[in-house]
């Protein structure tokens, strides 16, 4: 069923993000979050219910913001399913289920997906999600925005909303879980073919009782310098990218990363060195954003027995022989270094 859905719904091939970690959806959780300040109306807010939540007093921007308990009697109350990881992610499809609940304590009335920008998409339901078939039983849904562009990169992202009635008596826990049709609960990234990543934990909404509080293992992030560019990521991800991690909590605005450029070691040119790195190998830094094509590094250039300190381009222009291994012109260097030196010219040196 899952692959039939994808064959019908995937209309665009989306390339990888600049850094692969945005596509690796491991370690994610689904949070159940109640928004007491929101009251359902048939007039959908501009931007959709997701933007309405995140613009309200009940916005969820961290695990500490989640509210998992809803007390009755209460009508037209709203709560949400939130996709959460330890860092921003990008994904194109979501699948989640409800394990079951007591319909005598909680009544689902309205519900729907939260697509980016309040847009539309495609859904495939199992067992009359979220009501269950029979009512109160397990159910599920898989859904994705139209166009194949998906969510993100983002985090603490609302992906589904519910509206309903909480009775004053009795208790129940509406437990999020897998879609029983597969069974699977989690996310599909935007690569082709899409990779699937199961949620590691599922929250729950408690009616007249506490629900289930969940949170991913959130690693601290900071500025990571990669070839002079700055990216915010975890220290482990920075190391995997070959970057230089500047410390937890350090941002990229303004860019704290030192510039990189060409480094001359004799006549050899090495690019993507910082000035400090270049000096550490006794090189001569050519400046930020400089490159090695053409080679800017001066070295000995032999024109006959005459020696000049030229770049490779300058040496070629006079028809000389360039020696990148020799940074200067020691006395009589070209007498032995130049292949076309004549015996007469050599004797002339010593007269």
Image (cartoon, rainbow, N blue to C red):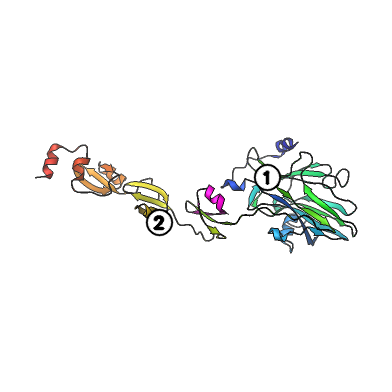
* Residue 41 is at least partly visible in this image: no
Q: Residue at x 21, y 49 (%)?
A: 330
Q: Is residue 124 left or right of residue 244?
A: right
Q: Is residue 331 left or right of residue 71?
A: left
Image: 192 above or below 272 = above
Badge 1 element: loop
Q: Residues within 10 Å of mark 1 (few under 14, many from 20)?
A: many
Q: Quadrant of residue 3?
A: top right
Label 2 crowd (10 A; few <14 / some 14-19 / many >=20): few
**Residue with the mark numbered 1:** 92
Residue of label 2? 276
State which region is magenta. 228-244
Q: In x, y percent, where is residue 214?
A: 72, 54
| Eye-nearest disc, 2 or 1 | 2
The residue lying toward the viewer, choosing from 8 and 61, is 61
Residue at x 34%, y 49% (from the top left corner): 265
Q: Nearer the viewer, residue 17 or 204?
A: 204
- Counting every numbered tag in the picture gives 2
- Asked if residue 238 lies in the magenta stretch, the reply is yes
């Amino acid at each position: 069923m899952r692959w039939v859905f994808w064959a019908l719904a995937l209309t665009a091939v989306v390339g990888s993000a600049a850094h692969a970690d945005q596509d690796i959806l491991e370690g994610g959780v689904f949070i159940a979050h109640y928004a007491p300040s929101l009251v359902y109306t048939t007039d959908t807010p501009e931007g959709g219910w997701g933007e309405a939540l995140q613009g309200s007093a009940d916005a969820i921007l961290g695990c500490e913001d989640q509210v998992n308990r809803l007390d009755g009697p209460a009508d037209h109350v709203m709560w949400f399913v939130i996709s959460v990881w330890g860092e921003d992610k990008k994904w194109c499809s979501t699948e989640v289920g409800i394990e079951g609940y007591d319909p005598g304590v909680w009544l689902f009335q309205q519900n729907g997906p939260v697509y980016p920008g309040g847009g539309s998409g495609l859904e495939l339901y199992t067992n009359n999600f979220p009501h269950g078939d029979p009512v109160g039983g397990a159910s599920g849904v898989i859904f994705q925005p139209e166009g194949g562009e998906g969510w993100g990169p983002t985090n603490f992202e609302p992906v589904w909303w519910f509206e309903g009635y909480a009775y004053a008596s009795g208790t129940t826990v509406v437990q999020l879980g897998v879609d029983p049709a597969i069974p699977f609960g989690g996310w599909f990234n935007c690569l082709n073919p899409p990779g699937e990543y199961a949620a590691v934990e599922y929250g729950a909404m408690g009616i007249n009782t506490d629900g289930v509080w969940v949170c991913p293992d959130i690693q601290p992030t900071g500025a990571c310098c990669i070839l002079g560019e700055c990216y915010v990521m975890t220290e482990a991800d920075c190391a995997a990218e070959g970057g230089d991690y500047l410390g937890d909590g350090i941002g990229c605005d303004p860019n704290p990363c030192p510039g990189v450029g060409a480094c001359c070691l004799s006549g050899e040119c090495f690019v993507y060195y910082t000035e400090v790195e270049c000096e550490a190998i006794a090189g001569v830094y050519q400046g930020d954003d400089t490159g090695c094509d053409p080679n800017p590094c001066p070295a000995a250039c032999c024109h006959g027995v005459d020696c000049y300190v030229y770049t490779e381009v300058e040496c070629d222009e006079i028809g000389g022989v360039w020696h990148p291994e020799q940074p200067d012109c020691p006395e009589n260097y070209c007498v032995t270094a130049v292949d076309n030196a004549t015996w007469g010219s050599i004797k002339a040196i010593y007269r």
